[in-house]
Image: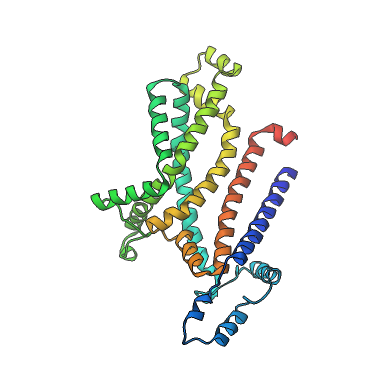
Amino acid sequence: MRYIAQRFAHAILVLLGVSVLTFLLLELAPGDYFAGMRLNPQISAQTVTRLRDAYGLNRSLPVTYLRWVGSVLRGDLGYSFAYNAPVWPLLKSRAGNTLILSLIALLASWFAAIPLGVWSAARRGGWLDGATSAGTTLLLALPDVLIALGLLAFALHTGWFPTGGMASIAAQEMGAAARVRDFVLHLALPATALAAGVLPILVRHVRSAMLDVLDSPHLRAARGHGIPRTRLLFRHALPAAANPLISLFGLSLGTLLSGSLLIEVVMSWPGLGPLLLQAILERDVYVVVAAVLLSALFLVAGNFIADVLLYVADPRIRVE
């Protein structure tokens, strides 16, 4: 349990560091939410000054940060200037949408990467290995935005998938099965675009990890006992190669979450991405800080889960 407690403490320190750095960068950036009002001749300078005082923009950075920490402890995550409301209710549903998209893309990418990587390593130098290498190289060369735009063009050309949003306008009038189908159709393209961006890296890491263990003595001994090839690969070789892949799991979750913000903007998925972009353009400070902090929280949670899985899977860590 000491190992888990240390990882949890590290996660808290990372989140504190991210929040401090975000506040510092926003403080150094020129302008604020009320800067545009100074250009309006109908709004006096005194009015702008009173608004800045009312929203706490004239306080020093340490005081602003400590007051924000107090709002986090209360569960508000600050106050939005643009929406004139606490930040957490604005982020709650959008954070859930981002998490749904990222988890579906994470499962899809790993379920595709494991068999592709395993069979590519098992048939090293064969046609399957060559085709997998060519496909992953092509995906690595394509920017995520181009993949998303290509999928949107496919949806517009075929009409098989919706081109944005999370549900149809008439979704509330549908039955349960029709609503589920409508949600899956809306989710398919963003999840595919997100999974396609991280899939080549996962496939190559799985292949590399498998190549390291396929020539090990215990695998040769298992092969000599006549164990079937599929069982040998997935019951013996894959668990032996699991440690680096478990560590990669947490990093892949963080990669998907950072990539999902861009995919959400391009494909109109109602997650954190569009809200964060709007808040950055409007200098809505507390919305920006909260959205960045939630993204960091998802990354830290992925790494923490990976550490727990490593603790369970590797007895050497428990001994240490």
* Outermost residue to the top: 224
For the C terminus, the quadrant is: top right
Residue 107 in picture, x, y percent from top left: 47, 43
Q: Is residue 95 left or right of residue 49?
A: left
Colouring used for the render: rainbow
Residue 310 in picture, x, y percent from top left: 64, 38
For the N terminus, the quadrant is: top right
Instruction: Name the residue located 67 percent from the left edge and 71 percent from the top edge.
Output: 64
Q: Is residue 197 left or right of residue 67?
A: left
Residue 233 in picture, x, y percent from top left: 50, 24
191 and 126: which one is in front?
126
Image quarter of residue 177: bottom left
Image quarter of residue 167: bottom left
15 and 23: which one is in front?
23
Image quarter of residue 65: bottom right
Instruction: Name the residue located 59 percent from the left edge and 59 percent from the top edge.
Output: 293
* Outermost residue to the left: 158
Residue 247 in picture, x, y percent from top left: 60, 39
Q: Is residue 40 visible?
A: yes
Q: Can residue 159 be seen in this view?
A: no
Instruction: Name the residue located 52 percent from the left edge and 64 percent from the top edge.
Output: 92
Q: In this view, does 198 lie to the left or right of 306?
A: left
- Marks counted in the figure total 0
Residue 32, placed above or below residue 276 = below
Instruction: Name the residue located 64 percent from the left edge and 42 percent from the top edge.
Output: 307
Residue 93, placed above or below residue 312 = below
